[in-house]
Image (tube, helix red, strand yellow):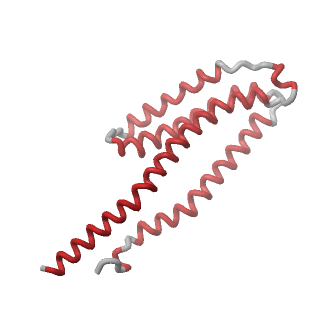
Amino acid sequence: MVGEVDTVKWSVVSTIVASWVVSPLLSGTIAFLLIRSVQKFILNAADPCAMARKYVPVYMFFTGFMIAMITLVKRLKYVGLQVNGEESILYAVVALFVRSLLVRIKHDPDDEKYSRFESVERIFAVLMIFTACAMALAHGSNDVANAVDPLAAVVAAVDSGVKYYKNLLR
């Protein structure tokens, strides 16, 4: 019969529910560790701008690598591009180009007459733009999924109902 409890794939439901708990905890922990490392290595330093120039490329590399890997492995398959694991890693390593963007940011002591973190903010702005672009991609993908999922559910329900009633008429 259509709509019985047995038709629910409980293993899938439990995975979804687990992600509601694990994802915020894991991302919160990672965010906390990143903030603490920025405070320790950059913001609490005697020369925050010099330390930002030293450590921000590391943050940018890992951020770019993760965003590239997620995009290459998860998202491109939906547009018909298949990328294997080795190719994904090769393309993700290209994220090193961000270092060239930091070289263009010059340290200007006049900027720091109101706050000693003005130059540091300009350095982190490059990373913020990069992550904002990735967030826009993820948000747009989620919006498409949210728009299509109800339609797919209706089509699946109608299709399974039609098959069920066709079997009854035989």
Closest to the observer, 101 or 52: 101
Q: Residue at x 72, y 18 (%)?
A: 106
Q: Where is 31 relative to 108, above or below?
A: below
Closest to the observer, 157 or 17: 157
Q: Is residue 97 left or right of residue 58?
A: left
Q: Quadrant of residue 59?
A: top right
Q: Position of residue 79 (x, y in %)?
A: 35, 42
Q: Residue furthest left?
A: 170
Q: Position of residue 19 (x, y in %)?
A: 52, 61
Q: How many numbered marks does the figure carry?
A: 0
State which quarter of the image contains the C terminus: bottom left
Q: Quadrant of residue 75?
A: top left
Q: Where is 54 relative to 4, above or below?
A: above
Q: Position of residue 13 (x, y in %)?
A: 44, 68
Q: Residue at x 38, y 34 (%)?
A: 87
Q: Quadrant of residue 107?
A: top right
Q: Is residue 143 left or right of residue 6?
A: right
Q: Position of residue 72 (x, y in %)?
A: 42, 39
Q: Is residue 58 left or right of residue 41?
A: left
Q: Residue at x 67, y 44 (%)?
A: 34
Closest to the observer, 86 or 82: 82
Q: Where is 13 relative to 50, above or below?
A: below
Q: Residue furthest right?
A: 113
Q: Is residue 123 left or right of residue 168?
A: right
Q: Residue at x 44, y 35 (%)?
A: 89
State which quarter of the image contains the N terminus: bottom left
